[in-house]
Amino acid sequence: MDKPVNILGIAGSLRHKSYNRSALRAAKRLAPEDATLDIFELNGIPGFNEDEEKNPPAKVAELKKRIREADAVLIVTPEYNYSIPGVLKNAIDWASRPYGDNAWSGKPVAVMGASIGTIGTARAQYHLRQVFVFLNMHPLNQPEVMIGNAAERFDSDGNLTDENSKELIGRLLKNLVTWARRLQSPEPA
Ligand SMILES: Cc1cc2nc3c(=O)[nH]c(=O)nc-3n(C[C@H](O)[C@H](O)[C@H](O)COP(=O)(O)O)c2cc1C
């Protein structure tokens, strides 16, 4: 069998009982056999300061290293005011700098998200996909995993209980693995 695809999972919430962090933990359990999913927590990353981008805080250096080591990235985003949370954008910005040292460049990436509203982070996800253009990432298009009415889809311990969401996440990860392998394979002569 091929070497497992190593996925780095990042959730854009710091909240203790975050649905998105819970969904990311569910994704770890739902990853296909030929993949691993490791989680990077965003707590402790200070606000971006361009004066410090050439000598970033240790947590940012660690994030950039983990991105570079990964074969693919999974971002699990909440929706804040119809967009992505500042804490996620801040981490993205740090890891994209300084100019010419963008750790995200060339990475296959999948997106999912959970919100308490009915639309399930659709607006945030499309904003994030716009950011991927300048980061030079390779987003997976489908399936779109938008977990609406999150309060009904997780139990009080943060376990994802909704079977449809689990099926979609499993399919998303399977497609991400195929996508990452396809992008890794050499160009035909
Ligand atoms: C500042 C802020 C803005 C929000 N804006 C939206 C929004 O635009 N759309 C939405 O569906 N939910 C919105 N919500 C509700 C979030 O869906 C809800 O807080 C969710 O639980 C956040 O994700 P988390 O559980 O992973 O922390 C907002 C919440 C906050 C704190």
Image (cartoon, helix red, strand yellow):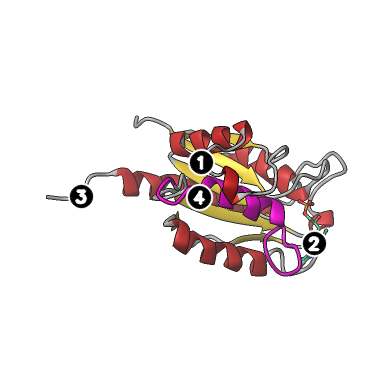
Rendering coords of residue 82 (x, y %): 72, 69
Give the number of the disc on residue 54.
1
Question: Dot 1: few (<14), some (14–19), or many (≥20) neighbours within 10 Å?
Answer: few
Write down the region rendered in magenta: 78-101
Which SS class for mark 3?
Answer: loop
Give the mark nearer the N terminus: 3 vs 4. Answer: 4
Give the mark nearer the N terminus: 1 vs 4. Answer: 1
Which SS class for mark 2?
Answer: loop
Give the mark nearer the N terminus: 3 vs 1. Answer: 1
Rendering coords of residue 147 (x, y %): 70, 59
Looking at the rendered image, the disc whose residue lies closer to the viewer, 3 or 1, is 1
Q: Residue at x 72, y 39 (%)?
A: 43
**Image height check: is 19 above or below 60?**
below
Type of amino acid under label 4: Ser
Looking at the rendered image, the disc whose residue lies closer to the viewer, 2 or 4, is 4
Which SS class for mark 4?
Answer: loop
Give the number of the disc on residue 96.
4
CA–CA distance in space, label 3 to label 4: 27 Å
Q: Determine contact: label 2, label 1, CB under 8 Å.
A: no
**Image height check: is 35 above or below 174?**
above
Type of amino acid under label 3: Glu
CA–CA distance in space, label 2 to label 3: 43 Å
For the N terminus, the quadrant is top left
Give the number of the disc on residue 149.
2
Question: Dot 2: few (<14), some (14–19), or many (≥20) neighbours within 10 Å?
Answer: some
Left or right: 147 in relation to 98: right
Quarter of the image where one finds residue 186 = top left
Residue under circle 3? Answer: 187
